[in-house]
Amino acid sequence: MTDFLALAQPGVQQLSPYVPGKPVDELARELDLDPASIVKLASNENPLGPSPKALEAIRGELAELTRYPDGNGFELKSRLAARCGVQINQVTLGNGSNDILDLVARAYLAPGLNAVFSQYAFAVYPISTQAVGAQGKVVPAQDHGHDLEAMLAAIDANTRVVFIANPNNPTGTWFGPDALERFLARVPGNVLVVLDEAYIEFAEGDELPDGLKYLARYDNLLVSRTFSKAYGLAALRVGYALSSAQIADVLNRVRQPFNVNSLALAAACAALDDADYLAQSRQLNDAGMAQLEAGLRELGLSWIPSKGNFIAVDFGRDTAAINQALLRAGVIVRPVAGYGMPNFLRVSIGLPAENARFLEALAKVLSA
Ligand SMILES: *Cc1c(COP(=O)(O)O)cnc(C)c1O
C-alpha cells in the first residue's frame, strides 16, 4: 500500500489535527447521559443562545436557499465598513475568522518563509502556517502571554506574517495599547501583522487597544474579528478582516467565491444591529467571570487572569484525571495539554446555573 502520509508535504505530516471541545451529544452517547443534563463550557461559545433578530433574519432567507449567496457579501461588508470606519474595499469576509487566518497563510506564506507566533497561541496559527509548507517560529511566552519584544527579535528576513491574539486563547492574556503601539512601530513594514481580536467585544474601557485605530497608520496591519463569540453565531461561521485595500484585494484572490453562506450573511447583519444582545453578552460574561473567580478562590485554585469569555484554571498537576471525572459528572471543559499546558483546564463562561454546576462538580471531584 502507498503511504499517503509520507507523501503529504512535510509541514502537513508534522501537524496534529485541531481538537475541538467535546460535543454534548458525543458525551451523552458515550456515558448514556441525557443531553439536557450536560453542561458544555468547552468552546468559548455564547451561552445566551443566538440573537432573536439573527434567527428572524435566517428565517427570512430560507426561501432563497436554491440561490448562491452574494459572493461579495455586499450588505454585510457595507455595514462592517460603516461600523469600523473603513472603506468597503478594506473588508474581507471569512467562513469564520479561521478562514481569514488561512487566507493570509495561503496568500503570504510558502516553503522557505515563516510566520512568528507565541507559545500557547491559538492552535490555528500553526495549522494554517504548516498547511502551506511554511515554518512556524514559536516564541516562548512570558507569564503565559505574548512576549512582544521577543517576538520582534524573532522576525527575520524570511518572516512574512506575525500572528498575535489580543486577548489570546487559551490563556486569556492580553496586552495594552502602549505595548501594541511599540510593537507596530518596530515591526518591519514588509511583515504582515495579523491582530486576532476574536474576543475584543468583551473588553471594556481602554485596557485593550482597539486594533482598528492603528489601521490608518500601519498598512501592514490586519485586524481579524468574528461573529462566533460575543455575537453568538459560532455555528454559522462568519468572521472578517479589516486591512489596507491592497491586502484585502490579495486575500480576495485566494478566497473561495462563496465562502460565507446566505444564512450566515443575513444573521450577521442582524446581529450587528442588535446592540442589546451584545450588551447582554458582555454583562453575562462579566458576572460569570466574577462567579467563577469567586468559586475557584474558595476551592483554593489559581488561574490566569483573562479578558476573554473563558478562564484557564491552574491545578498545579496534570489535569487528565480531573477532566475525566468532570466528564463523568456531565461537565465538559477543555483540556489544553495539546497547547503544552497539561496542568490547566480552560473553562468557558456559561450561564449562572452552568457556572454553578461546574463549580459544584469540581468541588466534588477535588474532594473525592
Ligand atoms: C474562537 C477564536 C477565533 C474565531 O474562530 P471563528 O473561526 O471565527 O469561529 C479566532 N481566534 C481565536 C484566538 C479564537 O479563540
Image (spheres, grey):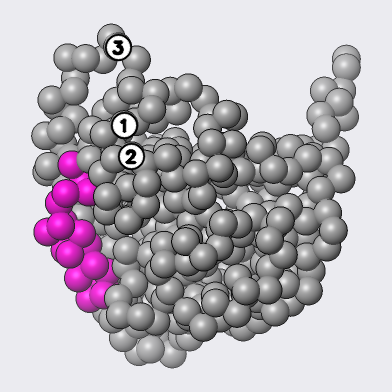
Q: Give amino acid for label 1.
A: Phe
Image check: 10 left or right of 253? right
Which tag, 3 or 1, sits closer to the chain's start? 3
- The image quarter containing residue 199 is bottom left
Residue at point 30%, 80% (across, down): 205
The mark closer to the camera, 3 or 1, is 1
Identify the residue at horizontal 43%, vertical 57% (top origin).
Answer: 198
Q: Quadrant of the C terminus?
A: bottom left
Q: Which residue is mark 2?
A: 77
The spot of residue 24 in percent (x, y) is 36, 44
Magenta stretch: helix, strand or loop mostly = helix
> On screen, 48 above or below 55?
below
Residue at 31%, 86% in the rendered image: 294
Q: Which residues are magenta?
A: 270-288
Residue 257: where, in percent of width, then height?
48, 22
Q: Residues within 10 Å of mark 2 (few under 14, many from 20)?
A: many
Q: Which mark is residue 67?
A: 3
